[in-house]
Image: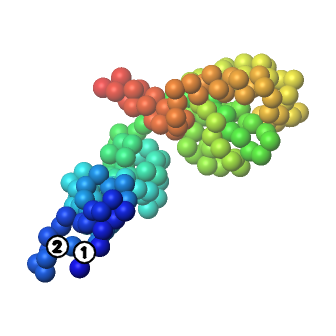
Amino acid sequence: MSRVDAAGRACSITLAEGRCPAPVEPGAPLDLCTRHLLEAYDWVARGVGETDLMPGPCPVCGSWVGVAYPSGRICANCEWRVGDVPDLEVADPRVDVVYYLRYRDQIKIGTSGNPRLRVASLPHDEVLAFELGDRLVEQRRHAQFAARRFAGTEWFAVHDELLAHIAELRLGVADPWQQYDRWVSRRLAAQN
């Protein structure tokens, strides 16, 4: 005996023993029950992949987001295949950045040519932004926000002017790390 949903629809799948008796999943675009919607999803995901977290950060770009296929997993950002060894002969070009990190109610303004390594060594709650630049740009920012600097450090109290500067750097940037990866990719492409 077939069950129906509130709109009077039953699953449209025909099984060996007859029509599937389950009700249609509420809001489903097709007359399929939950079980058959999931089976259809799994079938489609085999070909197009399924976005998911990777077992660890990508050794090439650092992203944690991957795409799983039956044949394996790739990084969603740079398409490195999980398990492949990165080509160490092709070193990333140096891209100096000024970074802005938030830790509790403070913001650190620093610079690095290897921000992944540098940021990983610092206490922080969030990477707020990157700005292309070296020590000269960093020194300008330290002078610009000097009134709120904690003496003898690169840490600053959170204040409106600094937040406005960071917001300007973040315009159109969903993830600062993806922005950094694009800068590295452009620099690498320019070398070839």
In which quadrant of the rendered image does the N terminus lie?
bottom left
In x, y percent, where is residue 186? 39, 26
Distance from Cα at disc 1 to Cα at disc 2: 8 Å
Q: Report crowding for label 2: few under 14, some 14 to 19, many 20 or more residues within 10 A (C-alpha).
A: some
Q: Amino acid at mark 1?
A: Ser
Residue found at x 49% / y 32%: 179
The answer to which of 144 and 26 lies nearer the viewer is 26
Element class at badge 1: loop
Residue hosting label 2: 19
Q: Are marks 1 and 2 in contact (CB under 8 Å)?
A: yes
In x, y percent, where is residue 155? 79, 36
Answer whether residue 156 is visible to the viewer in this image. no
In x, y percent, where is residue 29? 29, 52
Spot the residue most to the left: 16
In front of the other: label 1 or label 2? 1
Answer whether residue 171 is visible to the viewer in this image. yes
The answer to which of 72 and 188 lies nearer the viewer is 72
Mark 1 or mark 2: whose residue is earlier in sequence: 1
Q: Amino acid at mark 2?
A: Arg
Residue hosting label 1: 2
Residue found at x 37% / y 49%: 75
